[in-house]
Image: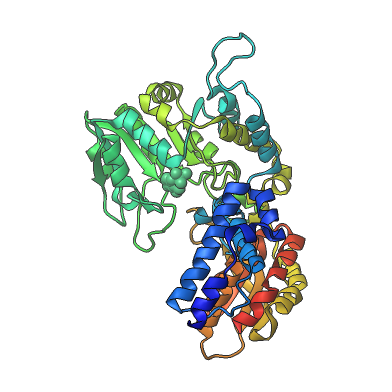
């Protein structure tokens, strides 16, 4: 009999494994059926490993205890939520792949309360009759933007789709060639137009579009004129574009609605916080756009949502579109949105209360001081393999807001001490950081892994989390 076969025969039975303390803990925590299944598959795996001979398991290592431990570890790993909180140390404040805006405490509390109880979502408390969910945030949106009316849908992509479908289905939508954007996640303006049933009429050229180009394109077939914020790029050099304000007279004369898709759409002048000026929604409304669309979870700092503000008659038309029903938001997001919007009533305290603005406005000195405090902690966790240092870096706003603007920031850099295989060593480090209890996401640049600390709120939790690298440090070497 081979050594493998001998071990196979001596493998514990499912019942034996289930008697161990680790298996009892697994039953307690995850329920009997899940624990039994996990023990079975841990045993199967050991058996397969032995049969194929790929792994030589010493006779006494596959005991009831080790099998139970393996089963428990498997159950614990499977219990991690798939929607996993992470430390966003990429330096991109509004990172679409990391869930964009982190919500304000007020928004979190409002969302939790709405989840826990029934809410007056479409119920008018003054009359006891049926109400309308948009009415819950309409007044706030009007107050903050100066618009006549407002509506809310799933996201800004939905807002643009709905506006196009309502105003330009079977008609023409006029857009500058310089503004036919593609943003992440396959949102391409021409495709959205087609899906909305609108015929795209491109005017001007990639680099230059003039008012007369629009004037020549407006006919009785025109459904709307669309201005699109070129969120994630800039055309530089010999360029010309027509600001929405300069199209107002033309659109009015031809009786065609002028729609301004702002994308990020901030509600407050970011220059207050030392950032570059980005047109606010109120400015776009005041400039004369008939409708303005923008996102809830970009610069606004709230939950995912698409907001449409503007002329009452147009908003009502949009609200009557059957597609609106398919794109509406639920009570949880409405609650979070309302609470977020209310914070804008007190701009002086916004940077304290709204994480997006807090992160964007964070001064360099504070970030650098935090980096100096955390540098020895990371150095200790990584051991001899890496040189850890405080490093200056540049953060980005992200989500297509001010794409060329970067913010002076600081963080930690970890550079492999030996040149040989440095790339692989860095990859392993990035992976080890992603495997921490709270995964840490940084970025690799110029031969080092950089953790930009701009968005790090909980320093103590971060330091404690790094302790999880202790076991991995040797493996990294
Ligand atoms: C981001 C963006 C959108 C899409 O908004 P979502 O909220 O991501 O759906 C549409 N238009 C512009 C100009 C954008 O920047």
Residue 63 percent across, percent down from the top left: 63, 70
Up the image or down, 5 lies above or below 108; here it is below
Residue 201 visible here: yes
Up the image or down, 224 lies above or below 319; here it is below
Snapshot quadrant of residue 76: bottom right
Q: 116 left or right of 191?
A: right
Q: Quadrant of the C terminus?
A: bottom right
Residue 242 percent across, percent down from the top left: 37, 46
Residue 40 percent across, percent down from the top left: 54, 58
Question: How many labels sit on residues?
Answer: 0
| Depth check, front residue: 24 or 225 | 24
Q: 319 left or right of 78?
A: left
Up the image or down, 6 lies above or below 197; here it is below
* Residue located 49% across and 69% down the image: 47
Visual colour scheme: rainbow
Q: 208 left or right of 473?
A: left
Q: 361 left or right of 449?
A: right
| Depth check, front residue: 324 or 169 | 324
| Depth check, front residue: 393 or 451 | 451
Up the image or down, 226 lies above or below 363; here it is above
Residue 272 visible here: no
Residue 226 percent across, percent down from the top left: 35, 39
* Residue located 56% across and 50% down the image: 83
| Depth check, front residue: 96 or 290 | 96
Snapshot quadrant of residue 142: top right
* Residue located 59% across and 14% down the image: 124
């Amino acid at each position: 009999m081979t050594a493998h076969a001998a071990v196979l025969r001596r493998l514990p039975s499912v019942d034996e494994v289930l008697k161990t303390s680790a298996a009892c803990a697994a039953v307690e925590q995850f329920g009997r059926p899940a624990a039994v299944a996990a023990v079975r598959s841990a045993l199967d795996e050991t058996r397969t490993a032995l049969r194929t001979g790929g792994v030589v398991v010493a006779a006494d290592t596959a005991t009831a205890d080790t099998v139970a431990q393996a089963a428990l570890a498997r159950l614990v790993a499977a219990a991690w939520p798939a929607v996993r909180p992470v430390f966003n140390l990429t330096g991109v404040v509004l990172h679409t792949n990391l869930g964009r805006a982190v919500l304000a405490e007020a928004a979190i509390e409002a969302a939790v309360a709405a989840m826990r109880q029934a809410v007056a979502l479409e119920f008018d408390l003054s009359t006891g009759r049926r109400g309308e969910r948009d009415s819950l945030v309409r007044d706030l949106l009007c107050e903050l933007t100066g618009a006549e009316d407002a509506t809310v849908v799933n996201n800004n992509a939905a807002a643009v789709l709905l506006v196009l479908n309502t105003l330009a289905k079977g008609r023409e939508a006029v857009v500058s060639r310089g503004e036919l954007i593609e943003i992440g996640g396959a949102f391409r303006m021409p495709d959205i137009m087609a899906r909305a049933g609108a015929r795209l009429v491109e005017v001007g050229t990639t680099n230059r579009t003039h008012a007369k180009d629009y004037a020549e394109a407006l006919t009785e077939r025109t459904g709307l004129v669309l201005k699109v914020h070129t969120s994630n790029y800039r055309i530089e050099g010999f360029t010309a574009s027509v600001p929405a304000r300069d199209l107002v007279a033309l659109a009015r004369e031809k009786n065609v609605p002028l729609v301004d898709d702002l994308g990020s759409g901030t509600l407050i002048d970011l220059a207050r916080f030392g950032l570059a000026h980005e047109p606010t929604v109120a400015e776009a409304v005041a400039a004369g756009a008939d409708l303005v669309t923008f996102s809830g979870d970009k610069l606004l700092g709230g939950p995912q949502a698409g907001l449409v503000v503007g002329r009452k008659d147009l908003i009502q038309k949009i609200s009557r579109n059957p597609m609106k029903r398919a794109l509406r938001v639920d009570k949880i997001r409405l609650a979070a949105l309302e609470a977020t919007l209310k914070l804008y009533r007190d701009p002086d305290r916004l940077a304290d209360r709204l994480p997006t603005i807090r992160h964007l406005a964070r001064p360099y000195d504070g970030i650098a001081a935090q980096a100096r405090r955390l540098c020895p902690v990371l150095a200790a966790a990584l051991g001899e393999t890496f040189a850890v240092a405080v490093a200056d870096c540049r953060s980005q706003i992200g989500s297509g807001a001010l794409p060329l603007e970067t913010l002076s920031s600081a963080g930690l850099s970890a550079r492999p001490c030996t040149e040989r295989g440095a790339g692989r060593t860095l990859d392993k480090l990035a992976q080890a950081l992603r495997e921490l209890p709270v995964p840490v996401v940084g970025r690799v640049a110029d031969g080092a892994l950089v953790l930009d600390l701009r968005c790090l709120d909980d320093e103590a939790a971060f330091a404690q989390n790094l302790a999880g690298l202790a076991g991995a440090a040797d493996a990294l070497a």
